[in-house]
Image (cartoon, rainbow, N blue to C red):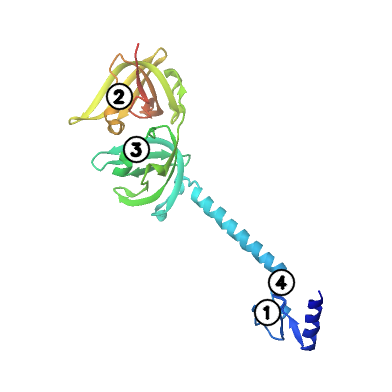
Amino acid sequence: MIDSIKEKNKAKKENLIACPSCGSYIEKADACYKCGAKINPKDRISLKKLNLSVLIIGLIGISLLFYAFYEANKITPINKIDEGMNGKSVQISGIIIDIDYDSSYQKTSFTVNDSTGSIDFYGWSDFSSALQEEPIFPGIGDNVIVQGTVDVYDGYYGAVIQIEVTSTKSYELQYNAPIESDVNQIGVNNLTTKVSIEGQVIDKYIKYSGSSINFVILTVSDITGDIEVFISDSLLNLAGEQAIIPDITDNVQIIGMVDEYDGDPQIIPTNATNNAITIIEV
């Protein structure tokens, strides 16, 4: 305390001033030669202003983080995706209503529908191979959230807009539990609904393209009526050796999505494996 008083008295005699920042006694100047702080109060940033600046910068940083998170997780309505978004990363959510597999290029495409429209997301050979190793395969009637890159190319009738994905991590599958139904409960008012029926195969039609199956139509009957089950070549090719094609008189359980053909309801199986087409032993 005494030393402090002596220093102050000495500073007064030598006409020194105390630096408002580091406390050193220095000759009058615009800035402290020891710490560089401004001496004139008007030139110094007040603590209040400094705290306010820090607060503003912090709020801006938090806002940018929230914006980045929002943009990364924002669901884009399908009808808002246009040619001008080519190359842009987007996220969509909807129901898988169709699956196509091109064995020549090992390209797998899923058609997704939301309340605004439909769009395909696709992947090439690595994606297709990885799909077949997944324990739960995305199926028709399932909900998915997809993150991918908008791909626009010139098609026969104009621009075609799709979404390209590179791995099975590009989508999040939301399995829809089917609604157990009698055949007569299923109509065109149930389109895109995932259902489960049990009955007997009373008819089977196989359309061939050369030696390859183009599609299979089963007619399944229960005590309330009968309905067609349409199995495409894409579903069969994706299922590979696990593909199930029941025979006439087989008792089956079919899990799939309600679709329509020529105004009549039909069921498209979620996939062509025993996860969706099960032969019931009696």
Report, in whole angstroms, how far the alpha carbon at label 1 lies from the one at label 4.
11 Å
38 left or right, relative to 169: right
Residue at figure coordinates x 32%, y 37% from the top left: 100
Amino acid on which the number 2 mark rests in the picture: Ile
Residue 59 at x, y percent in the picture: 62, 59
Name the residue furthest front: 2
Q: What element carries label 2?
A: loop
Name the residue furthest bottom: 14
Amino acid on which the number 4 mark rests in the picture: Ser
Q: Which mark lies nearer to you, 2 or 4?
A: 4
Amino acid on which the number 3 mark rests in the picture: Leu
* Dot 2 or dot 4, earlier in sequence: 4
* Dot 1 or dot 4, earlier in sequence: 1
Mark 3 and 2 residues: CB-CB less than 8 Å, in contact?
A: no
270 left or right, relative to 246: right
Q: Which mark lies nearer to you, 2 or 1?
A: 1
* Dot 3 or dot 4, earlier in sequence: 4
Picture quarter containing residue 239?
A: top left
Residue 46 marker = 4
Q: Which mark lies nearer to you, 3 or 2?
A: 3
Residue at figure coordinates x 39%, y 29% from the top left: 259
Residue 38 marker = 1
Q: Is mark 4 on a helix, strand or loop?
A: loop
Q: Name the residue under label 2.
A: 244
Q: Name the residue under label 3.
A: 131
